[in-house]
Amino acid sequence: MGNAITVSEQTWEQEVLKSALPVMVDFWAPWCGPCRMIAPVIDELALEYGGHVKICKLNSDENPEMGARYQVMGIPTLLFFKEGTLKDRVVGAASKTHLKAKLDAFIAP
């Protein structure tokens, strides 16, 4: 496991919905090739955006109810939350450049 914070159904409210920082959550599973492909990028972003954005990972196999709650139909899916509200999503293995652009726009005032 890397720099991203692991969340679950039990920690979701505290880590994501009540976070003072904007949050990006990576819905992933161990068997998912594209998820494994972007995992190092997620960890790099967690380091680069530390203190500005909370980067989290949620194992969708272990927490299927969370995927259902947010209509996650495929993985990887990245959800972006601000002040407890879902603001944006990226479905599929996006490039680091694309994710950085999303995060930069997400944290802009």
Image (cartoon, grey):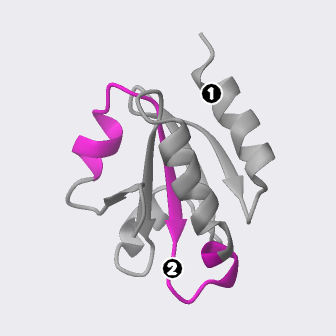
Quadrant of image for the N terminus = bottom left
Q: Amino acid at mark 1?
A: Phe
The residue nearer to you, when weighing 10 against 42, is 42
Residue 29 image point, x, y percent: 51, 79
In this view, 55 is above or below 3: above
In the rendered structure, does residue 28 fall within the stretch colored magenta? yes
Q: In terms of sequence position, does the residue under pointer 2 or pointer 1 come before the other?
A: 2
Residue at left 62%, top 27%? 106
| Residue receiving disc 2 | 29
Residue density around tag 1, few if under 14, some if 14–19, many if 20 or more, within 10 Å = some
Residue 72 image point, x, y percent: 58, 64
| Relative side of 76 to 5, left or right | right
In this view, 66 is above or below 16: below
The numbered mark at residue 34 is none
The residue nearer to you, when weighing 100 against 10, is 100
Considering the numbered disc 1 on the image, is that residue within a helix, a strand or a loop?
A: helix
Q: Amino acid at mark 2?
A: Ala
Splitting the image into 4 quarters, where does residue 54 fall?
top left
In this view, 2 is above or below 60: above
Quadrant of image for the C terminus = top right
Which residues lie in the magenta part?
A: 12-36
| Residue receiving disc 1 | 106
